[in-house]
């Protein structure tokens, strides 16, 4: 009979914990996406292109992080395009990701800008550099 009581107690505790979990609110800390479209390392730099989203915007950025002894060591480069979600006119993150994935790395940034201009979607674009040393 003690085994029955142990099992009964375990079921009761699990049920109580389940009820508590149902009443808790889920935190949405990491509910946004980030996809790497290109990533490469060589002896000179680390290259990577990323499409990401936040609560308010979708960003595409091409990064170059030079390695020590090359170029201007510690000087990082990021060319980006930021679009506010309120201006997307029905364009979704998945559609942008699929669109960008159709092009070679060298064409991607300009083709994305052309798409946004064609659809009259305002965006911010720039080349950003900073020293990370």
Image (cartoon, rainbow, N blue to C red):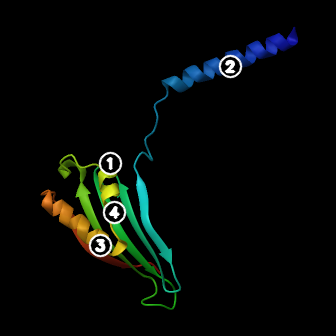
Spot occupied by residue 22 in the image (x, y as percentages of width and height): 51, 24
How far apart in space, not on screen, are marks 3 and 2 (Cα)?
58 Å
Q: Residues within 10 Å of mark 2 (few under 14, many from 20)?
A: few
Mark 2 and mark 4 lie on one chain; the one further toward the N terminus is 2
Of the numbered discs in the image, which one, if any, rests on residue 102? 4
Q: Which residue is mark 3?
A: 107
Residue drawn where x is 80% and y is 16% of the image: 6
Q: Which residue is mark 2?
A: 13
Name the quadrant of the N terminus.
Answer: top right
Q: Residue furthest top?
A: 1
Q: Which residue is mark 1?
A: 55
Mark 4 and mark 1 lie on one chain; the one further toward the N terminus is 1
**Which structural element holds mark 4?**
loop
In the picture provided, is 68 more to the left or to the right than 89?
Answer: right
Which one is in front in this view, the residue at disc 3 or the one at disc 1? 3
Residue drawn where x is 24% and y is 67% of the image: 111
Which one is in front in this view, the residue at disc 2 or the one at disc 1? 1
Q: Residues within 10 Å of mark 4 (few under 14, many from 20)?
A: few
Which one is in front in this view, the residue at disc 2 or the one at disc 4? 4
**Which structural element holds mark 3?**
helix
Mark 2 and mark 1 lie on one chain; the one further toward the N terminus is 2
């Amino acid at each position: 009979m003690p085994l029955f009581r142990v099992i009964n107690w375990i079921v009761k505790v699990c049920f109580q914990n389940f009820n508590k979990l149902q009443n808790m609110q889920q935190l949405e800390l990491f509910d946004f996406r980030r996809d790497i479209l290109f990533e490469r390392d060589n002896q000179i730099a680390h290259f990577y292109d990323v499409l990401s989203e936040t609560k308010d915007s979708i960003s595409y950025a091409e990064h170059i992080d030079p390695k020590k002894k090359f170029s201007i060591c510690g000087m990082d480069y990021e060319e980006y395009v930021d679009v506010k979600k309120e201006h997307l006119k029905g364009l979704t993150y998945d559609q942008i990701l699929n669109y960008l994935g159709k092009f070679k790395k060298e064409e991607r940034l300009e083709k994305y800008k052309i798409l946004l201009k064609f659809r009259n979607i305002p965006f911010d674009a720039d080349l950003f550099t900073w020293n990370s040393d």
